[in-house]
Image: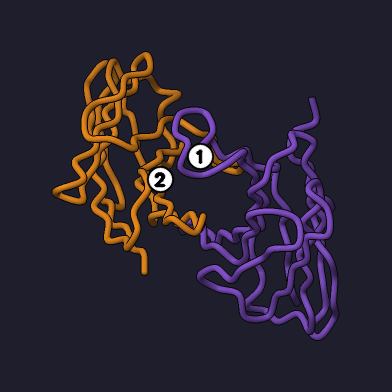
Amino acid sequence: NAGVTQTPKFRILKIGQSMTLQCAQDMNHNYMYWYRQDPGMGLKLIYYSVGAGITDKGEVPNGYNVSRSTTEDFPLRLELAAPSQTSVYFCASSYSRGLGGSNEKLFFGSGTQLSVL
Amino acid sequence: GQSLEQPSEVTAVEGAIVQINCTYQTSGFYGLSWYQQHDGGAPTFLSYNALDGLEETGRFSSFLSRSDSYGYLLLQELQMKDSASYFCADADQGGKLIFGQGTELSVKP
């Protein structure tokens, strides 16, 4: 049972470089999320998707882009990396919202530690 | 919009009971979730409340009052391994799931 798989685990970027953080889930979940977490802080929602072909902005979308062409994959694109994007990035998925119980449970990937220097 | 408030730190002793509060302001509120995160790890799901009242899962319980826009996580028989950060999170009807800033729980011997 792979669950939510994020790659890479660590990455160092130079200012102005671009990269894509990969996220894949094998649980046939409809909802997928990207969060960033700065040291000692909470999780901030970057983008989310309620199904293939549908994405929406979260709390801190500037500097990022996403796509959801399949149910399984939800890549996060950083264009023109900046030091302010140094953070730990978590991808997560859940079956649904509003049905209650275990359907609400968010499954997280192990995270990507990104440094922009 | 959505916003959640929770205390930044709580300290308790092993074997005790601790309560972590969360107040929220959310239009189209769906339910309140709780997550645990140990240093360097991914958050893990603890509980979810959609209706008023108490949900119990082993040593952990979670409570919700929709009329007060308030919930709490209750941890009983505290163990050293419970030292972690605890987050409340809420979802709106559009599926957006927002987390609070987190409460760092320190359990002392």
Where does residue A82 sit, x and y in percent of width and height? 70, 82
Mark 1 highlights which residue? B37
Q: Residue furthest left?
A: B68
Where does residue A78 sit, x and y in percent of width and height? 77, 74
Residue pictured at 36% horizontal, 69% vertical = B1
Judging from the image, what is the letter of the chain drawn in orange? B
Tint of chain A? purple
Residue pictured at 81% horizontal, 66% vertical = A12
Q: How many marks?
A: 2
Q: Are marks 2 and 1 on the same chain?
A: yes
Q: Chain of mark 2?
A: B
Q: Secondary structure at mark 2?
A: strand
Tag 2: amino acid: Phe
Q: Callout 1: 10 Å neighbours few (<14), some, many (20+)?
A: some
Dot placed on the residue nearer the N-terminal end, 2 or 1? 1
Q: Secondary structure at mark 1?
A: strand
Query: In the figure, residue A1 lies in which quadrant?
Result: top right
Residue B31, above or below A74: above
Mark 2 highlights which residue? B87
Q: Is residue B42 left or right of residue B29?
A: right
